[in-house]
Image (spheres, rainbow, N blue to C red):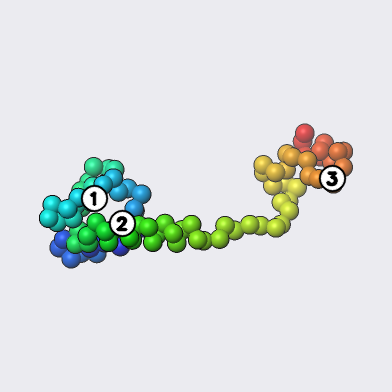
Amino acid sequence: MIHLTRINHVPLVLNSDLIEHIETTPDTVVSLTTGQKLLVLESPDEIIGRVVQFRRAVVAQPFPVSRKIPAETAYPLAVFHRPGEPESSKSRRGE
């Protein structure tokens, strides 16, 4: 999501994945994949910079990794054999 300003100075938060292309005519026109067109005060270079900055921030976020072993009843992992688990315990899980 990026912050832009409409031509009438009303703030706007835009899902940057919806941007199809940006034109300068002399105002900046942002065309969306939905067919909607937005007139904004920012230049195409400013918009591109904000999109790049947003995407870098998203990629830089650490991916949460759980070190916990799922419970016996957890789906879908409950149907798989866990390393070190006796084969006989499979029958208790409905296999």
**Crowdedness near tag 3: few (<14), some (14–19) or many (≥20) residues, C-alpha within 10 Å:** few
Mark 1–mark 2 Cα distance, whole angstroms, equals: 9 Å
Q: Position of residue 86 (x, y in %)?
A: 87, 42
Residue 43, image quadrant: bottom left
For label 1, count other residues whose C-alpha is less than 10 Å away and answer few (under 14), some (14-19) or many (20+): some
- Residue corresponding to mark 1: 22
Cα–Cα gap, marks 2 and 3: 53 Å
Relative placement, left or right, of 15 versus 58 is left
Which residue position is annotated with label 2?
A: 48
| Residue 67 seen in render | yes
Badge 3 element: loop
* 94 left or right of 55 in image: right
Under mark 2, the amino acid is: Ile
In the rendered image, which quarter contains the C terminus?
top right
The residue at which mark 3 appears reads as: 85
- Identity of the residue drawn at 30% across and 62% down: 3
Locate residue 18 relative to residue 80 in the image: left or right: left
Residue at the image point whose x is 70% and y is 43% from the top: 77
Is the C-beta separation of discs 1 and 2 under 8 Å?
A: yes
- Determine whether 42 is above or below 34 in the image: below
